[in-house]
Structure formats: structure tokens, C-alpha cells
Amino acid sequence: MVFLIQQTLLFAVPLMIVALAGVCAERSGVINLALEGIMIFGAFIGVLFVRIMQENNIFGQEQGQILMLLALLMSAVCGAIFSLLLAFSAINLKADQTIGGTALNMLSPAIVLFFINLIAQQNTLGMTKGGAASWFMIRPSTFGLPKDYSWGAILDILINKVYLSTYICLLVFVGVSIFLYKTRLGLRLRSCGENPQAADSLGINVYKMRYIGVTISGALAGMGGFTYALTTANCTSTGEVAGYGFLALAVMIFGNWTPLNIALGGLLFGLFKCIAATYSTLDINGDGVYMLSEIGISPYVYRMLPYLITLIVLAFTSKKSRVPKAEGIPYDKGQR
Amino acid sequence: MLRLDPDTGKQKWYGSDGAKSVLSAIISILIGMAVGTLIIVFVGLTKEGISLKGMWEGIRLVFLGVFSTGRDGGELTFGFNPVNMGNMLFRATPLIMTGLSVAVAFKTGLFNIGAPGQYLMGTMGTLTVGLTLGNSGCPVFVAWIAAFLAGVILGGLWGAIPGIFKAFLNINEVITCIMTNWIAANLVTWWFDAHDIFKNSAEGGKVGYIIPLKNVDVVTPKMGMDVLFPGSQANGGFWIACIIAIGMYVMMTKTTFGYELTACGSNRHAAKYAGINDKKNIILSMVIAGALSAAGASLYYLAGNTEFFWSTYLSLPAEGFNGIPVALLAANNPIAVVFSGVFMSMLNIAGTQLKSLTAYNEYIADIIIAIIVYLSAFSMFIKQLLNKRDKKKGGNK
């Protein structure tokens, strides 16, 4: 079970944080279809940062956690900068937000692959030495303890062979949720997604709020992208994140645009993703869940389920959906 | 305010809406190409091993890649290259079809981002029926038509799903399209994973690919393309795509049905008030869009020598997404889609030339395409600027 829970967390956490990224943008009134693109960009920046630091021998393996934190920060900052492209076209130029988002989804892999090919002469950019596990994974030896040290059943799940980024993302998830729902700025931001005209009449700067929403969204998605690359792709960037951005969009809709439901949705979809990804290895780990593969259901069914469930949920909840009312509509002061 | 010709009293040709669409498309293209050039210069200046000459070669290839005839004594040569030209038309075929798909949906006010999924379903239908019938020994002609229709029908049904969701539940088609895209990606992988008979196991190095249709001789006839462009992959599929484009133009502009679709796109509620069945039209529009995307896939794989990598559950075909820029550049005009489709594939060819002849790689073409999409998102803005300029001039008179 340890293996299954840890793996599910690995898959679920990037989903949750990127889905929350979607909420931040949509609550402020901008559809962020570019989540996938920003994730790809964030993953690339993070990996590139790790690579450059390794090449210049600035960090050694002992300082792996610090290096990872800095890379996470870099990917968040660059994700936020990249998302400004969307904010500019959607807010200032009042362009169609879905097309703008699609453009970023196309631009990001193109740029990333262009530079990866220039740097590495192939389609994959990885670390120069070592792997994600040996550099960034927390294990007993990180604390100077013997290799086979055990903290007991529960702590083993939580801190043995996990990545620090998972917990940072969880913390950020809680922090941003509190920001959105318990602070004055968060309330103002949400009001711009429901009725920007009313918000403006009360002196709230709609453009500024929407810029804040999209920028936070970009930072979270960039972070999520690097976390994904670090934990499930061995710290490599290949110009794609396997549709994770779109899956996060599904989580957001499934979670009805509220953080708690998104956390649950993320865990559920993460479990499906985990079952599909570790399908053939479940038995080896002796987790007692290998019966899933014995049922004879193709792993592709598990991969398909999240999208299918989202479609069905959409069909049944369309009447009482909490979708922000003003999302996707450019705000024009003249129409007040 | 319209600009009228003082002599004839009619609207000047360059003041019309169509001319402005063309102009804003050209502006988008030029800015995209300029950014591509800038990136080439920037990379050339910062990266060691790329000389000034290499930079100049890269820039020339971005603009004239399709006319490149390789190198002669270290210098790039340009001229008529039948292989490049033919391949350009060949690769334009699926782009034209997905472009038409997105354009038709746009006319009905729907953003068909589901083209990749419909394209995949078309691939599945065409390859399955083509290989099955081809092996069963039925006449090649019948097998070709059946394979084409199978793809088209499957794509149409797949397109109907977002249409039904939109019409009856009023759920944004973008969301349902994205979901159906990824469902299709997994469904297609599942289907081919479970059916070993379609997998290419005979040729080593082709593991993971489906048997190409040329092995069973279900291939689109060349229709003169082999004479025009010897040595290239071009075939009659391009002519078929052109005919379908003309058909779509006639349907959208000259028939009652096309008018109803456009009316639903302009204002769904007004159309309903005028007695048009808006639900039926929305679903039909998505069915047609799905069928068109799938037809693009059918024509591409019916070329025979194209191979499909079936384990596609992690990625969606680029041809589907590239239909969006093709339609946007063409301002959703079916005839213009043919030209913008050819232009997009010209950029692709330029990209491959760039990769084989210089230190740069083919992704520069993708960057240019993405920038064009980004710009066309606010092509309305560019148009408004043009209109404003008109107004100012009109006021001075």
C-alpha cells in the first residue's frame, strides 16, 4: 500500500496545483486554456536551471534540496512571465481567450523543443549528472541515517522516498486557497469573475485583478510543470507533459471550481493515472492490488476514465455548475 | 464608415471586409516571420558555431525553404524543387481538411478544438476498414471508398458528441472537445493494442506502427501529381481536398442550410426566434466539422506510404491543432483555407530544410505558426485599427 499511496500522491499533487492554477485565472474572469503550455514551459525552465547549476558545479549532491527549491522558484517565476502573454492578449487587447490559450499551447512546445534541440541535439533535456531520485529524493540517508532505517509505518509513507516538492505544492495549494477565499484581495479577485461591471463600480480595478489572477495561475502551473517533470519524468523536459494540463482542466471542472473538491478530484484522477502507469509493476511491489491487472481491463481504460467521468459529471451538473459567470468575456469599460 | 469611390459611387475594393481580412492575415504572417527571423539572429549571435553566413542561410530558408535545392559547393541553391513542392501539397491535404473543419464550426459560432480527436477517430476507421477489406480481396476501388467513408462517419459521430452537449445542455464545446480528444487518444491506442493483426510486425524497426495501406494496395490514385511533381509523395488527395473545399464554400454561402448555420453562429437566439432549429444546426455543424477532420486523416493515410504510430495515448496529432491557425488565417473562408493550408505546410517544409541544411531545427516553423495563431487571436483588434484609420481619413475629406 505504501507504494500505491506514494505514487498516487506523486501523480495527484501536480494535478491539484495546476487545477488550482486554472481556478485562479477563471475566478478572475479569464479562461486559462494554456495550462498545458505553461506546464511545459515551467518544466523546461526548471530542468534547464538544474542543468546549468550542475554544469557550473554550484550545487553538489548534498545541497540537492536547495537546488530543487530554487529550480521550483525559477519555474514558477518563468511560468508567471509566460502567462503574461495570455493576460496581455485577453485583458488589454480583448482577444478571444480560447484562441490565445491555444496559441500559447502551441508556442510553448515549439520554443521548448527548439532550444532543447539547440542545447542537447536531441528531443530530451535531462540532468547532466545523476538522476532525480539520487539528487532530490528524501530518504533516510538525507538525514544521515542508515539506508534501511525505518520510521514506522505512517512516517515511512510520508517521508521515506518522497520528494520535498510534493509537500511544497501541498502547502502552496492550501495557501492559495486561503488567499482566494479568506482574504479581501481574494474576494475582489473573485468578484471580477462574476460581475466585473459591479466590481468596477465599487472601485475595484478589474484589469489589475485579472492580471493578478492570470499571473498566479501561471506561477502555479509553472511550478506544477516542474514538479511533474521532477517526480514522474526523472527530471527531464521533452516538450510535453502528457496532457497533464488538460487533465488538470478536467479536475478543475470535476471539482466545480472549489479547492476542496479539486483536492478530492486530483486524488481520484491521480489514482487512475497511477494505476495505469504502474499497471505492470503493481505485482512486483507486492501491494495486493495486482488483482486490478488480473481483471483484464486494459490500462488505457484507466487513462480514459478521468476524461469520461468529467464528461458525465458535466452532463449531470450543468444546471447547477459553479462556473464563474463572467469568464471568457473581455471586460470593456464602455459596456458598464 | 465605408469608403466610397468618388467616380462610381461604389465601395472601394480595399475598403471591403474581405480585403481587410486578407490584410490582417498578411500582417500576422509578416510579424510571425519577423519574430522567426529575430530568433534565428538571436540564436546565431549567442550560440557558438553559427557564423554570420549560417544566420543568413537560416533566414533565407525560412522564407524560401520550399524552393531550396540543397547545397552546391557549400552554397545554398534555390530553384524549382519538384519533391519539396509535391510534399508541400501532400502535407497540405490534412491541414486543409482540419482547417475546413475548424472554419465550418466557427461559422456556427463553435470553436472546434476537437479536431485532433476527430482526426484520430478518422485514422482508426480508415486503417481498420482499409486493412480488413484490402486483405479480404475485395476490389481496391470499393475498399478505398469504404475505408474513406468509415473514417468520415466515425469522425462525424465523434464530432456529434460536443455538438449534443452544446445543443441540449449548453455546455461549452471547448471543454467537451478537449475531453473527447483525450478519450479518442486512449480509445484508438486501446483498439490497436488489442488487435495485433493491424500491427506492422513484418518489418524490423517498424515496431509500434500500423501496417501501411500500400501493403494491401488500397491507395489514392496519383491523378497527375506524379507527372507534375516526380519523386514526391503528392497524390490525388490534394485535388479531393480542393473539391471538398469548393463544396463547403457553396454549402456555406449558396444554400439555405449554410445560411441557417451562419445565422446560428451570429446569434443563436435570434435564429431560433426566426424559426431556425438551432439545436439541430449546432449538432449538424459539429458532425460536418468532425467528418471533415476525419476525412483529412483518411486522405493522409490512404496515401499508402504513411505510417501511423498507434501508441498515441500521450499526445494528440499536430495536424488537428494546426487546423486552427489555418482557419483563422483564412478568416473562415473555405476557399482561402486551401491557400492558408498550403502556406502552413510550406512553413513545415521550410522547417525540414532548415534542419537538414543548417544548425537550426524544424521547430522554428512551429514557433512561427504559434505566433500567427497568437496574433490572429486579436486580428479583430488589427481590423479595428484599420477601420479607425479609415474613419480618420474619411473625416478629413
Image (spheres, rainbow, N blue to C red):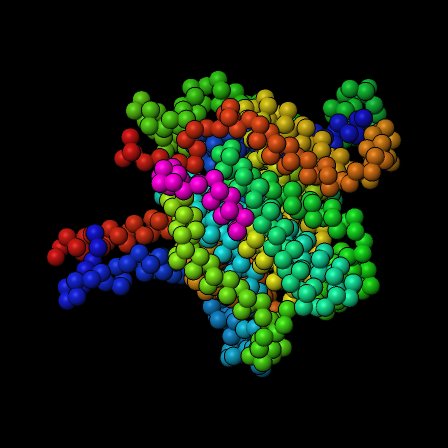
Rendering coords of residue B352 (x, y %): 58, 66
Is the residue A249 above or below the residue B313 in the image?
above
Is the residue A330 above or below the residue B189 in the image?
above
On the picture, is A30 further left or further right than B156? left
On the picture, is A120 further left or further right than A154? left
Residue shown at the point (29%, 51%) measured from the top left:
B385
Magenta highlight range:
B268-289
**Quarter holding the C terminus of chain B?**
bottom left
* Prevalent SS, magenta region: helix
Q: Residue furthest front?
A: B275
Rendering coords of residue A93 (x, y %): 36, 43
Rendering coords of residue A109 (x, y %): 57, 50
In magenta stretch: residue B271: yes
Q: Residue furthest left?
A: B397
Residue shown at the point (55%, 79%) measured from the top left:
B228
Q: Quadrant of residue A259?
A: top right
Rendering coords of residue A200 (x, y %): 32, 27
Looking at the picture, tell me which residue is in the foreground, B329 or B365: B329
Total numbered badges shown on the rendered structure? 0
Looking at the picture, tell me which residue is in the foreground, B224 or B193: B224
On the picture, is B197 further left or further right than B150? right
Is the residue A328 above or below the residue B124 in the image?
above
Residue A13 seen anywhere in this rendered image of the structure: no
Looking at the picture, tell me which residue is in the foreground, B385 or B183: B183
In magenta stretch: residue B165: no
Residue shown at the point (69%, 45%) measured from the top left:
B187
Q: Quadrant of residue A311?
A: top right
Residue shown at the point (82%, 63%) measured from the top left:
B202
Residue B127 seen anywhere in this rendered image of the structure: yes
